[in-house]
Amino acid sequence: MASIITGECQYFILILLCFFAFICFFLFFTKPTHSVRLPPSPPSLPIIGHLHHLLFFLLYKPSLFFFDILPLEFLHTLSSKYGTLLLFRASFFPFLLVSSASVAYEIFTTHDVNVSSRNLPTNEGSIIFDTSGFVTAPYGGYFKFMKKLIVTKLLGPNAQVQSRSIREDELERLRGILLDKARKKESVEINKEARKLVGNIVARMTMGRSFTEENGDVESIQSLVAKANASKIKMALSVLIFGQLEKVGISWFKKRTVIKKFDKLIERCLVEHKEKPNKDQCMDMMDVLLAVSEDPNAEYKITRNNIKAFLVELFLGGIDTSVNSIQWTMAEIINNPIIADRLREEIDSVVGKSRLIQETDLPNLPYLQAVIKEALRLHPPVPIIPREFNQGCTVGGFFVPGKTRLLVNIFAVMRDPNVWEDPLEFKPERFLTSLSSGQEDERNKQTLKYLPFGGGRRGCPASNLGYMIVGTTIGMMLQCFDWSIKGEKVNMDGCFKEFTETMAYPLTFTPVTRISTIDSETLHT
């Protein structure tokens, strides 16, 4: 414990040293701006701006270390006290915090192009936190080309149909595990089983191999994903604050060790994939990306680093988001038995009891869709969206200077009482309400304020795949099982880890096989 505290103190000392290093820049190179109507701002201090508010927050939360704080709670504290549109500074870096659904709607409609770049600090030459990746790429030729490639070839309708058998196989594998647990009357930690499910799906769609296969590489990738996820916040802060120090030989958090291992492992997988193509199976993502990189007529020439960075982003960002969504959705359903009963009635009516739920059933299960949407509203996979204003503009009646960092608090936006009736209650029916033609425009606006996968041009292009994985997983667990938990309710406390909100106490329950369970011979029709 002493070593941990010492390490945390070192981080604070380094940050303070950086602040003092910025003093000269602040005093000698900044120029006074003309008087404009800026957004509301909390009281600030010279040089450090509003960082003292974070210090006071930490003093009231002595059990939290610097990198384990709840950013959502801190941002909520600021917006509750000073307003839902807030301008603050971290040293001389300006940030606009948006916690209002109407302002978020304005930004992603009127100013979408202006905020289409993240302009995140980069880790030059790396496959993580570098512009080689799709997530961190500036809005331009590479980003547009990759998004088009994703929605047409990598995760487009045809690709999803071709990879459907992968997801069906993994869903049946999970069902078999739950049946075994039910027979033995053993409890299940849904986070662990969902992680195996989603991890295997991503691995098989990406490279044709699952995490459960004993081939070494995918197991190593799984281990590296866990290590990288555990230190994502530290790695990001390292790039943000300590990047300049590394140029003179000072390295922090040992982030390069994980990155280099990732790079080496993905490179070996790419080489093996090219040398030993599996012609008996459909093309996976590695096949498509390698083919595009070697196509002389491609609209954009993607590099080896582009491919590796994109694949790493899939593993780092594509697994936890779906796993957390499955866990939160099941927790909400278990805490609302009436909703669970209605879901089972819908599934039994549409799917029946002789086969397992399929992806093609989802459009015919509106209540299941509404339940998942409501769970994602209350527990968005990525609760904070970072962007940057390329040019100055007017937002909510206030002028926002160019190069201001934008933080959209999606967690707060989708709980905004001005848009959502009873925003803290789990009410799937809000997504079933049929509106008259005169209210259609308002319904469209509400849709644009529903942002679980981001908004605008940088919204997640894999959201449809995420909906299918979560939908079929939740559907299977309700179709085939009842669930027994300790106590009357699931503890819904959350915590912020690895840039996502997860359950503070892992969801654990005991599956109970339903009377009319599905025969193994008639899983699919």
Image: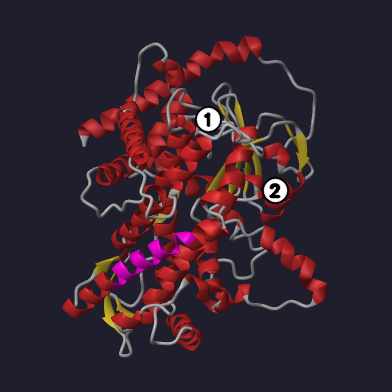
Categorize mark 1 by other alpha carbons within 10 Å: few (<14), some (14-19), many (20+): many
Residue at (62% x, 50% y) in the render? 99
Question: Which residue appears at 46% of the width and 38% of the height?
Answer: 290
As drawn, 463 above or below 222: below
**Which image quadrant: the N terminus?**
top left
Q: Measured along the vertical axis of the image, is residue 434 above or below residue 505?
A: below
Tell me where residue 229 sits by quadrant: top left
The magenta stretch is 162-175
Q: Is residue 472 magenta?
A: no
Q: Secondary structure at mark 2?
A: helix
**Which residue is at 63% across, 9% downward?**
28
Element marked by disc 1: loop
The disc, 1 or 2, on the residue closer to the chain's N-terminal end is 2
Q: Is residue 172 magenta?
A: yes
Image position, residue 211 (x, y; %): 28, 52
Q: Position of residue 448 (x, y in %)?
A: 68, 58
| Quadrant that contains the C terminus | bottom left
- 189 vs 346, nearest the viewer: 346
Front residue of 327/19: it is: 327
Q: Residues within 10 Å of mark 2 (few under 14, many from 20)?
A: many
The chief SS type of the magenta part is helix
Q: Is residue 225 left or right of residue 78?
A: left
**352 with respect to 437 (left or right):** left
* x, y percent for residue 281: 39, 55
Residue on which the image places disc 1: 131
Camera-nearest residue between 34 and 337:
337
How far separated are the C-alphas under marks 1 and 2?
23 Å
Q: Position of residue 475 (x, y in %)?
A: 43, 75
Q: Check disc 2 and report the residue beneath it.
A: 108
Residue type at tag 1: Thr
Asked whether residue 497 appears in the rendered view, the answer is: no
